[in-house]
Image (cartoon, rainbow, N blue to C red):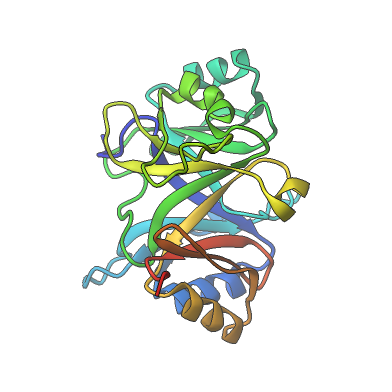
Amino acid sequence: MTSIPVGAPIWADSLTTDLEADTRFYMRLFGWTSVDTGEDFGHYTTFGLPDGSSGPGRAVTGIMPCPPDMPPSQMWNLQFRVDDCDAATRRARELGGTVVSEPEDVGSLLRFSMVADPYGASFGLVEPKEPGSGFEAWGEPNSIGWVEYRYDGVPAEGMRFYTALLGWNVTTPPWENPSSPKPYAALSAAGSEREFGGCHASDAWELELPPAWNVMVQVDDAVAMCERAVELGGSVAAEPLEVPGLMIAGIAVPSGTVVGIQSPRGWE
């Protein structure tokens, strides 16, 4: 069906109050192509990495106008792959999660639900029904390459809900201080050695925010990308910060949605 492992991130998207402005911003900032699916699908717009063809390129994320009864996204919404959306949604509820929207079909492409974990962080569960559903690029420049969860506590404990629901492997990376009372938790899907994300203990200003998932787009230079975002009418939501092996930052699109970026720069 798709090469994305069960339990791993399969898609990310956001709701916007200004589809035209945000679409233009993303295309100019990341060099993406875009395809509007039209009125029948709420003008859902898929972004892709150009692949040299006349088509939409390789899918990386999506955006759509806010329905009348929903607020715009503060951050990109993250979804994980499951084999059975209905069963996984029931299991999430049994584990103490909250079902935000019940499973429903999206055409013939997939079955989808939205839930919130016991701490209030929302995410989606996606059961793909056709080949090629989900990310067609991961970890390449200008595609999503990492997802990060912030948690006010011991990260491995915060991930217990997800290990029970999605079967994740949770490990402590070798660069983590072994004496840390709240060591970083690296995440990978069952049966896969590739880490797709992590969980860190909230610190400083993050302590005032609820737990949440943040999607990180891989870029060549996070500092330069922040400067470019401002030139294009966006803003810097989180100034560039060095972490082990990476430079990370947060940028806000014209309508306000924040997305993380990361680059291998740092320690120079």
Decide which of 199, 86 is in the foreground and name it.
Answer: 199
The residue closer to the viewer here, 247 or 177, is: 177
Query: What residue lies at 69% left-to-right and 66% top-to-bottom?
Result: 256
Quadrant (top left/top right/bottom left/bottom right) for the N terminus? top left
Name above or below for residue 247 compared with residue 120.
below
- Residue 170 showing in the rendered view: yes
Residue located at (67% from left, 49% from top):
203
* x and y, in percent, of residue 95 in the image: 60, 16
In the rendered structure, the answer to whether residue 52 lies left or right of residue 97 reads left
Q: Which residue is painted at 52% across and 83% down in the image?
A: 228
Residue 178 image offset from top left, x and y in percent? 46, 37
Q: How far across and down, in percent of the image, does residue 134 sit? A: 37, 45
Query: What residue sits 33% from the left and 65% below the top?
Result: 56
**Furthest-bottom residue in view?**
231
Q: In this rendering, would 85 be left or right of 200?
A: left
Q: Is residue 46 visible?
A: no
Question: Farthest front residue?
Answer: 179
Quadrant placement of the C terminus: bottom left
**Total residue callouts:** 0
Give the quadrant of residue 201. Answer: top right
| Horizontal relation, residue 130 to residue 256: left or right | left
**Vertical side of 226 occupied by 218: above or below:** above
User: Compared to 168, does 94 lie above or below?
Assistant: above
Give the x, y percent position of residue 225.
49, 77
**Quick one: which residue is furthest to the left in this view?**
52
